[in-house]
């Protein structure tokens, strides 16, 4: 059997959540999608993720919401992370932090292990993403398919992680930089990979933020409030096809809607 996994890049702002609410079940049906992961760390109005946007995404057909460096921007999400296995935070945060860095979800008769780690280059000095991911693979309950969201700034760090775990994790994708890369592929040892899924967010913006606000900041160097742009939204991501007999990813394609 072929399992089609849709991974959606960073969901930015309310209009993007609404587009997902309006279209995801239809996309799932039309493309025969069995499992959906979306990075939701910027899905709340004003940034971060709150209970409302997390719930909206899962109600809209996202099986697991991953996050990143903005996970804890809203205090209310801490308890929600503890109570819900459909939303995870980077695993390399300290253990005492709310939530989990991985989850196993049953869907269509298969068990999907979804993991989330954050890169360290140009980011917070968390635990090593390589060792943290190895630890999850060693300790996770049984699963059929494994998926890793690498939330990182540096392309080299994401590529290094993908090469290190090629053949050990079935689907790996980068998030955080909001620009879709063109390197989606099946790697040498059967892992699906893309360096960045891109953004589910407003077109005609700077990574989702109103362009005028960014011009002002870059030209005057004065503090500026970053407002999410209100232009048309495009959903970016990738679709990975996993063959349950061959136990490897056999196809990986860009997604745009
Ligand atoms: Fe991020």
Image: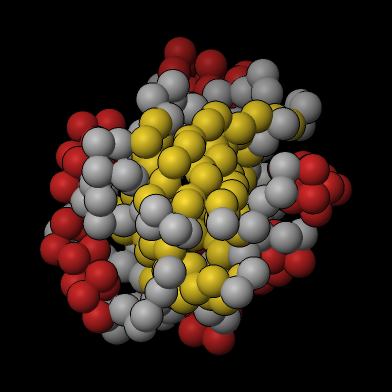
Q: Is there any visible trace of residue 132 in the rendered image?
A: no
Check the picture and name the quadrant holding the N terminus.
bottom right
- Residue 129 relative to residue 99: left or right: left
Identity of the residue drawn at 32% across and 44% down: 190
Identity of the residue drawn at 16% across and 47% down: 164
Percent position (x, y) of residue 123? 26, 46
Percent position (x, y) of residue 129? 21, 57
- Residue 51 relative to residue 73: left or right: right
- Residue 42 relative to residue 243: left or right: right
Say above or below: 180 vs 151. above
Observer-nearest residue: 214 or 180? Answer: 180
Check the picture and name the quadrant holding the C terminus.
top right
What count of labels does the image hold?
0
- Residue 221 relative to residue 239: left or right: left
Identity of the residue drawn at 48% across and 51% down: 242
Observer-nearest residue: 170 or 79? Answer: 170
């Amino acid at each position: 059997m072929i399992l089609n996994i849709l991974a959606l890049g960073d969901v930015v702002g309310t209009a993007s959540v609404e587009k997902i609410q309006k279209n995801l079940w239809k996309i799932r049906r039309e493309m025969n999608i069995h499992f959906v992961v979306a990075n939701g760390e910027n899905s709340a109005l004003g940034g971060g993720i709150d209970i409302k946007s997390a719930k909206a995404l899962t109600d809209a057909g996202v099986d697991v919401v991953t996050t990143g460096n903005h996970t804890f921007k809203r205090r209310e999400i801490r308890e929600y992370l503890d109570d819900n296995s459909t939303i995870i935070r980077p695993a390399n945060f300290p253990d005492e932090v709310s939530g989990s860095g991985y989850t196993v979800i049953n869907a269509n008769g298969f068990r999907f292990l979804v993991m989330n780690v954050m890169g360290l280059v140009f980011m917070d000095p968390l635990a090593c993403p390589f060792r943290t991911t190895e630890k999850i693979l060693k300790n996770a309950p049984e699963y059929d398919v494994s998926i890793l969201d690498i939330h990182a700034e540096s392309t080299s760090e994401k590529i290094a992680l993908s090469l290190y775990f090629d053949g050990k994790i079935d689907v790996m994708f980068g998030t955080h930089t909001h620009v879709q890369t063109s390197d989606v592929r099946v790697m040498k040892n059967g892992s699906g990979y893309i360096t960045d899924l891109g953004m589910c967010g407003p077109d005609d913006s700077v990574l989702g933020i109103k362009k005028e606000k960014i011009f002002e900041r870059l030209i005057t160097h004065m503090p500026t409030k970053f407002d999410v742009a209100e232009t048309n939204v495009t959903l970016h991501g990738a679709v990975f096809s996993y063959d349950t007999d061959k136990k490897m990813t056999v196809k990986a394609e860009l997604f745009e809607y």
